[in-house]
Image (cartoon, grey):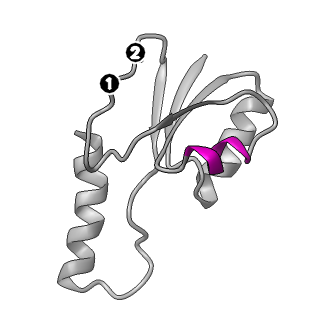
Amino acid sequence: MEILVTGATGLIGRELVSELLKKGHQVTVVTRKAASAKNLWSSPVKVIEAHLTEAALHDDLSSIHAVIHLMGESVAGRWTAQKKKQIYDSRILSTK
């Protein structure tokens, strides 16, 4: 199965991608820092460099069977009005 993962370089994402690769899945990751992502896994992982809160993906995703959306502003820290907006925007806008 080919699976697209956003937030793949985060704490949960790194472990998830490693497990998906061990189980034989093909993984495509969307990241703002392609070079960093390419250094994380020894197995072939397709990397799409994009900032999803600023622009839509224009890559051909017709082979993707599932999407796991983990990216977004950290929920750690004080939830000020600005922090809440960053959390909301990073998760909702990137999903659109």
Identify the element where label 2 is drawn: loop
Residue drawn 41% across the image and 11% down it: 62
Residues at marks 2 and 1 touching, judged by CB atoms closer than 8 Å:
no
Q: Nearer the viewer, residue 3 or 61?
A: 61
Q: Which residue is mark 2?
A: 60
The quarter in which the C terminus is drawn is top left
Residue 87 to residue 92: above or below? below
Point out residue 33 in the picture as x, y percentages from the top left corner: 53, 50
Main secondary-structure element of the magenta-colored stretch: helix
Where residue 60 appears, as percent x and y from the top left, is 40, 15
Image coordinates of residue 58 in percent, x first then y, are: 32, 24
- At x 28%, y 50%, the residue is 53
- Residue type at the position of mark 2: Asp
Please report the residue visible at 26 percent of the width from the left and 41 percent of the height from the top: 55
Q: Position of residue 27 (x, y in %)?
A: 62, 28
Q: Please rate how many residues cluster around mark 2, counting C-alpha atoms within 10 Å: few if below 14, some from 14 to 19, many from 20.
A: few
| Quarter of the view holding residue 18 | top right
Query: What amino acid does circle 1 point to?
Result: His
In the rendered structure, the answer to whether residue 75 lies left or right of residue 2 reads left
The residue where tag 1 is placed is 58
Q: Quadrant of residue 38?
A: top right
The range drawn in magenta is 34-39
Q: Residue placed at 24% from the left, 86% from the top?
A: 80
